[in-house]
Amino acid sequence: MEKKEKVLLAAHWARELDADGLARVVEAMVFRSYPKGTIVIELGEMFDPWVGVVDGLLKMRTLSVDGKEVSFAGLHAGAWFGEGSVLKQEARQYEIVALRDSELALLNRDTFMWLLDHSAEFSRFLVYQFNERLGQFIAQVQYDRLHGPTARVARTLSLLLNPVLYPNVEDQLKISQEEIGLFAGVTRSVANQALKELEGKGIVQLEYGGIRILDADALRTVED
DNA sequence: TCATTAAATTGTT
DNA sequence: AACAATTTAATGA
């Protein structure tokens, strides 16, 4: 019970809930752990609950027609996702893969719908989140053609830094180059080269076990 | 607190 | 994929 409250304290959407709402959420919340590399949600799977990341790092991806991997977003601790599938009660349009050992919190559909009906804060949170995702999608369309590894890695880092979807992330990202590679869809070696290039441009600073973002705006506009 | 060892991460081939 | 170098974390004196 203590853990659930901790999770809710970190969740933006839960802060304005009244006692009744909180009680419902606490009652309904369930935890699940996944080892690194696990496909948490398969493409096309019917998976009802709304999902929050308690700990770890996951990525959301789809496969393009020719089988190429397209990553949409990284999911940090504090991120909540899957509202589209919950609302429409349809199969998941994407895959969720754990990049690290990760723990998720699940909230069943009934509770989600109750929140939507009873909490203006919750509804507002969803609107912001939808809007943010739309922005990412548009950026993706612009970016995904004719770009080399450096631009790809740069975009990846931008997505990880996005302040609305990942509220607890600061300019110091604790992520290994291997994980960045997994996330960007490049090998660690390529990721390493790309990062060094970005470092040479003064956009990031490499550190052991992570990187520091020096210029988030420049990161969004790298074009190789 | 310091020294040693193991594990993780990085940079290069 | 494999290697060596470096950094951190863990262990015990």
Image (cartoon, coloured by chain):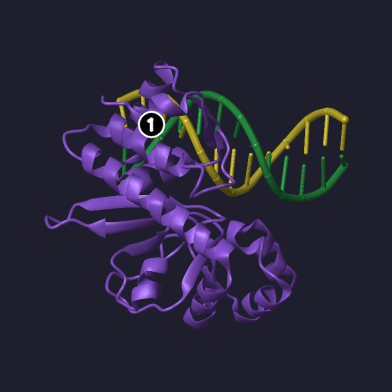
Chain colours: A purple, B yellow, C green
Image point (68%, 70%), residue name: A4
> Is residue A122 or residue A145 the one in the foreground?
A122
Label 1 packing within 10 angstroms: few (<14), some (14-19), many (20+): some
Q: Judging from the image, what secondary structure is the residue with disc 1 in?
A: helix
Question: Which quadrant does the N terminus of chain A fall into?
Answer: bottom right
Q: Which quadrant of the structure image shows residue A201?
A: top left
**Left or right for A204, reference A150:** right
Q: Is residue A154 visible?
A: yes
User: What residue did someone put label 1 on?
Assistant: A192
> Is residue A106 or residue A209 the one in the foreground?
A106
In the rendered image, residue A70, in percent from the top left (x then y), is placed at 26, 51
- The chain holding disc 1 is A
Image point (26%, 26%), residue name: A223
Image point (36%, 71%), residue name: A85
In the rendered image, residue A158, in percent from the top left (x then y), is placed at 41, 37
Q: Which quadrant of the structure image shows residue A91?
A: bottom left
